[in-house]
Structure formats: structure tokens, C-alpha cells
Image (cartoon, rainbow, N blue to C red):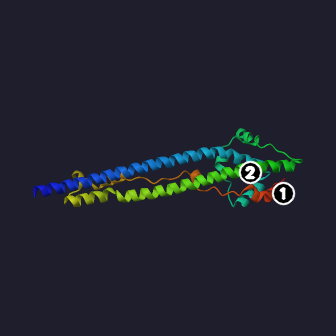
Amino acid sequence: MVEFDHAVNMLKMHIKKEIVDNYFAERSFLEEDLEALAKEEEEYEADLKKAAPIFAAFYNLMPSNAAISAVLSLWGATERPLSQEVAQVSQVEKQAILDNYRPHGWTASSRLKNQIFSIYEDLQKAAHALRKKQLQIAAHCELYNEDVERFNQNFDFNLISSQVEAMEGQDIPMEGGLSALDREAMAARMRLRKKVLTSCALATMPELPPLTAIKKKLARIIEGNL
């Protein structure tokens, strides 16, 4: 009987240890995943900072707000992409971008169109890269939050403590009699929070068409607003 009781106690200890080990192993994995997600956000924000002056320069070149609205229609967008980030771009930064796209052509109209065409090609590539990263980050965040939800369900303190108490055959709460308030505080500390993405990392960038697909329409927009 003594040997049996000892074996049962050893089994109980092993089960408790396995619960604790699994908790910290899963938590460590999720914390590393959260760090990886944060790094993706940092890399995206760095790319966003590089792209904002290109958007600012493009908007600056368009002959009117009506022309910009017409371009947004071509993009299937209702608002200017990166409008908040563009507002933070200085005139010096915009000019530095414009200096890379010197106007060329026989007339003022053709020079402006060619300059806009040149900058649009790089704008479209930057927008495509940003959208791709936005979608990747959003998908990663969704998977992380799903894992967090499962973790919180699997390692709910109230459920675990009840199971341990049932296993011990106790009529009093574990840990010397934790109050309901203490239990809830412990449960809160054990839970992980879901990740909320920064607004700029949300998948909001429209898929801009390549220049070849809209060149004629873009030219008519420019000409019609000179």
C-alpha cells in the first residue's frame, strides 16, 4: 500500500511538472514568434519610410487634386495611399526624389507626362512590395493570435487548478487557499495578450496596376488637368 501511494504521488508530481514544463515551453515559443512579428513590423516601417517620399513626389507632380482623384479611381482606391506618412515628408525629401526623375520631351506637357511616367514605375513597385509585406504581416499576426487563443484556453489557471485539486482529492483551493480575486489575478498573469497591428501595417495598400496597363488613361488625366 505504501509503495502504491508512493507511485501515485510520483505520478501526480510528474503530471504537475509536465503541465508546468508545457506551459513555459509554449509560452517561450509564442514570445519568440511575437519577437519575429515585431521585427517584420520594424522592417516594414523602414520600407514605408523609404516609399513615402516617392508617393509625396508623385502627388506633388500631379497637376491638380482632380487629377489625383482620377488616378485613385484607376487604382480602385477612395483615399490617397500613405496620406499620413506623405504629410510628414519635407520639401527637401520630395525634391531629392524629383531630382532622380528629370523631365524630358519637346513640350512642357510631354516633359511632365514623361516625368510622371518614370516616377510611377518606381511608385508601383514600392506599393507592390509594401502590400506584399502588409499581407504577410497580417497573416502572421492572425496565426499568432490563433495560437495565443489556444494557449490561453489550454493553460487557463482556473481550469488547471481545479484539475489539480480534483486529482489531489482536495476540498479546499490549491496554494493554501487562494481567494477568487487572487485566482483571477493569477489567471490574468498567465494569459498572453493578442497582438494588435499598428495602423500602417494593416493590409490597406491597394494593388496598383503597372504603368503599361494605365499609361494611356494616365496621360489623358494629366493632359485634361493642365
Residue identified by numbered label 2:
120
Q: x, y (%) of residue 62?
A: 78, 51
SS for tag 2?
A: helix
- Residue 189 appears in the picture as rendered: no
Of labels 1 and 2, earlier in sequence is 2
| In the image: residue 8, left or right of residue 221 | left
Q: x, y (%) of residue 37?
A: 50, 49
Q: Which mark is residue 91?
A: none
Circle 1: is it few (<14), some (14-19), or many (20+) Cα within 10 Å? few
Residue shown at 70% from the left, 48% from the top: 55
Direction right: furthest residue: 106
Q: What's the residue type where badge 1 is placed? A: Gly
Q: x, y (%) of residue 42?
A: 55, 45
Residue shown at 23% from the left, 61% from the top: 166
What separation in Å lies between label 1 and label 2 (alpha carbons)?
Answer: 18 Å
Residue shown at 73% from the left, 39% from the top: 96
Can you tell which of label 1 and label 2 is closer to the viewer? 2
Q: What's the residue type where badge 2 is placed? A: Tyr
Residue identified by numbered label 1:
224
Residue shown at 74% from the left, 40% from the top: 95
SS for tag 1?
A: helix
Q: x, y (%) of residue 184?
A: 33, 55
Whether tag 1 and tag 2 are in contact, CB under 8 A, the answer is: no
| In the image: residue 72, left or right of residue 4 | right
- How many numbered callouts? 2
Nearer the observer, 65 or 215: 215
